[in-house]
Every structure is written in structure tokens, then in C-alpha cells.
Amino acid sequence: MSMFEEKVNEAIEAAKGLGVNVDADLLSKIAAGLGPSIYNADAALVSSSDKEELDRVKENFLKKKLGCTDEQAMDDAIQHAISIFGSGNRNKLRILFYYICVDKLGKSSVYSD
């Protein structure tokens, strides 16, 4: 199993633990889009207590990658992801966090072939 497959499987297992059903193909495409950041221990996680990090998620992923323009919908998607993980959970995997946002915003078509 490649390192990439290990990271995707780690996110799938984390999703199961949180009671989230995921589309493995979509999750894999989101992971591929994140590039080498998924292999860096710090970059692979989202710190929901860091406002600057959440702003980067909004700017660089939700706006630039997904093309979102609705500020309230983006804020709601981020808060939805945080609530699923639990604010005290320090292991918010970026792959899964982004997946939850994509799903909440109905933006899976961005990753369609």
C-alpha cells in the first residue's frame, strides 16, 4: 500500500469513527488535490482554534478551489466540520475536514472527471 493510500485509508477510518459516510473516490480526489501537505504531520491537520488557519481554509480552499462566494455558507461549512470532529478533537485530518466542507457546500462536482 502506498503512502497516499495509507493517508486516504486513515481518513476513511477517522470518518467511520465520527459516524460520517464518505465517498472514497471523492475523498481520494480531495487528498490528491492537497498534494504533499498530507504527509506533513502539522499540515495534515486543521487547527480549528487558529482563526488564521480557518481564514486560509476559507480563502485558499473554499473560495479559490471550490469557487464559493457565499460567506455565510462557507462559515457554516467550516463550523459544520468543526462540530462533526468536536472542538476538543486535536486530530482534525485536513483531508476529512475538506471532504466535510465539500459535502456541506454541495461542491463535489469540482472533483468530477
Image (spheres, rainbow, N blue to C red):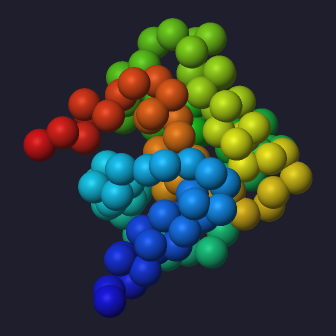
Query: Is residue 51 rendered to the left or right of residue 74?
Result: right
All told, the count of numbered labels is 0
Query: Is residue 84 rendered to the left or right of residue 95?
Result: right
Quadrant where the N terminus sits is bottom left
Residue depicted at 84% across the width and 45% down the height? 87
Query: Is residue 64 rendered to the left or right of residue 98?
Result: left
Question: Is 13 or 53 nearer to us in this picture?
Answer: 13
Q: Is residue 99 visible?
A: yes
- Measured as percent of width and height from the top left, residue 34 is found at 40, 57
Query: Is residue 67 rendered to the left or right of residue 20?
Result: left
- Measured as percent of width and height from the top left, residue 19 is found at 62, 51
- Measured as percent of width and height from the top left, residue 23 is found at 36, 50
In the picture, residue 57 is in which quadrant?
top right
Q: Which residue occupies the extreme left position in the image?
A: 113
Q: Is residue 37 above or below residue 7?
A: above
In the picture, residue 107 is in which quadrant?
top left
Residue depicted at 53% across the width and 53% down the height? 96
Question: Is 47 or 29 nearer to us in this picture?
Answer: 29
Residue depicted at 80% across the width and 47% down the height? 86
Q: Is residue 90 above or below residue 71?
A: below
- Measured as percent of width and height from the top left, residue 89 is found at 81, 57
Quadrant where the C terminus sits is top left
Q: Is residue 60 visible?
A: no
